[in-house]
Amino acid sequence: MRKTVLSLLAILLIAAGLIVARPVLFLAGVWWQDGKTPRSMPAAGTDDASRLNATQPAEVIRVAADPAEAEKQLADLVRRAAREGRHIAIAGAQHSMGGHTLYPGGIALDMHPFNRLALDEGKKLLTVGAGARWHEVIPFLDERGYAVSVMQTNNDFSVGGSISVNCHGWQNDMPPICGTVESFRLLTASGEIVRCSRGENQELFSLVLGGYGLFGVILEVELRVVPNDYYEAEAHPVAPRDYVKVYHELTRGHPDAGMAYGRISVAPVSFFQEASVTLLRRTATDKPTKHTLRDEQPSLLKRLVYRGEVGSDYGKNLRWWLEKQMGETAGKVLSRNQVMNEPSNLYATRDPDATDILHEYFIPASRFADFIEKSRPVFLSYRPELLNVTVRNVEPDHDTFLRYAPEEMFGLVLLFHQRRDAAAEATMKVMTRELIDVALACGGRYYLPYRPHATAEQFLRAYPQAPEFFALKRRYDPHGIFENQFYLNYGAPLAAGVEKAP
C-alpha cells in the first residue's frame, strides 16, 4: 500500500514538473530566438511605425527647441513652402501607419525638440509642446502628484501626434483626448499663429483635433490633468456577448472605477469565445502620490509571453491562460502614472523582415456582440497572425469634426504580426476590407491612423463628413502646404471628384 502511495506521489510530482517545465522551456526558446536589440524608429520623413511606407523626403527640418526661435523658423518655412510650391508633412513619434507623417519629395518637419512643459496646479492645466513624448510628460506630472487624463495605453507617442489622431485609451467613460484639450496654438498655412479653443477659432479647433496634420502645425497644447490616484486591478471573465452589459455594471455609478479595458481571447482553444474585463479600481493607500515612478526595467517575462504567440498555438493558449490567472498587473496596487508609463516597444517585433500592424474598429454598444459574431468567421477564413484584441470604451465626442465616436462606442484594438512582403500586404488588404464591411454593417467605423486599405466608398460610409472636412482643408490651406499620404489617398481624389481606392 505504502509503495503504491509513493508511486502515485512520484507520478504526480513528475507530472507537475512537466507541467511547469513546458512553459519554462517554451519561453526560454522564445528568448533564444528573439532579437536582442529593439529596433529604432525610422528617421523623420522616411517611414512610419508600419515599416511599409518607405518614403524619400526632399529635406528634413528639425524644429528649434527654443519656442521663440521655433515660431520664427516655422513661419519662414511655411512662407517658403508657399513660394516654392512645396508640401510639409509633420512628424512626431511617427506611430501612425498610413503615411500620415510622410509626403514623397516633400519637407518632413521633425517636431521632437519642441517639448517644453509647464503646469498650472491651480487650474490643473498642463501646457506642453507638441513634440513632447508621453514618457517626458508622465514623469514631469508625477513629480507634482498629477497624471494625464486621457492618452494611449503606451508612452512612446508625441502629444501633437496624439492630438492629431484624437487618441483614446483605458480611461473609462471618457471621450477621446479632445475632451481634455482646453486650447492649443496653431501655425496656419498663412504663417499666422492663432489660438484655438471651444470659444476662439472653434471651427479650426474641431478640424485640427483628429485632423491628421492637414491644417497647420500644432505648437503647444493646454491639457486638463487629474490626480495621480492609486488603482488595484480586478479581472472579470465574461462571454463576449455579455461584454458591454458587464462593463457597464462594473463602471457606471461607481466613482471608484478609475480605468477599465477588456481582452478578447485569440487563443485557439477559445478564439473570440471568451473575454475579460479588467477594472482598475481606485483604492485608498498611504503611498505618496508624488515621485511614484521607480527605475524599473521593462518586464522580460511580459515580452516573452507576448512574442511567444507568434506562430504558436501553444503560445497563444499560454498567454490567455496566464492573463486569466494573473491579469495585467498581477494584483499589484499601482499609481495611475505607473500604469500608463510603459513603452510599446516592450512588445514590438525585432524581426527585420516582419512588422506589427494595428487595426481598430469602433462599434456602438448595442451592436458589440454582433461584431464579435460576424468578424469571427473572417479571422477563421484568413488565419492571420493575430496577437491581441483589447477593448476600450469611448464616450461621445462633441468636439472634433472628423469624429469616430458620435455615440458611445467600444473600440476593438487588434494587433497583427505580418511579414514585410507584397503577398502578406495584399492578403491583409483584402481581409481588412472585409472587416471594415462587418464594422459598417454593425453601424461602426474604423480608425484612420492605420493602414490605408479601406476603399474610397468604405471611407465615405465610415466618415460621411469627409467631403466637407476636405473642402474646409482646401479653404484654410488653398495652396496645399500641409499634406501627407493620408491626404493623397483620400482627400485629393475627393477634390478631383474621383472615388478611387488607394
Image (cartoon, rainbow, N blue to C red):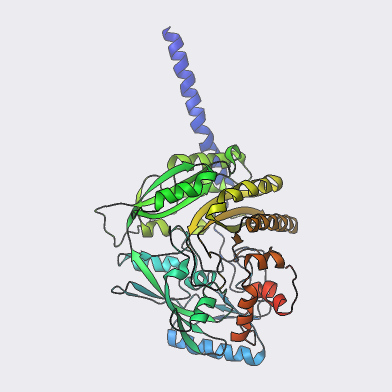
Q: Using the rendered view, name the quadrant where residue 268 is placed.
A: top right
How far from the left and from the top, in percent, is residue 460?
Answer: 67, 68
The percent position of residue 359, horizontal first and vertical second, equals 60, 58
Q: Quadrant of the N terminus?
A: top left
The reply to whether residue 8 is visible in this rendering is yes
Between 105 and 440, the residue placed more toward the observer is 440
Left of 178 or right of it: where is 282? left
Q: Do we see residue 53 in this rendering?
A: no
* Quarter occupied by the C terminus: bottom right
**Which residue is farthest front?**
366
Relative side of 427 to 196, left or right: right
Q: Nearer the viewer, residue 357 or 22?
A: 357
Say above or below: 255 vs 85.
above
Q: Position of residue 275 (x, y in %)?
A: 52, 44
Q: Is residue 404 above or below residue 115?
A: above
Q: Residue furthest bottom?
A: 83
Q: Residue at x 50, y 71 (%)?
A: 163
Q: Image quarter for residue 339?
A: bottom left
Against 295, residue 487 (above or below) is: below
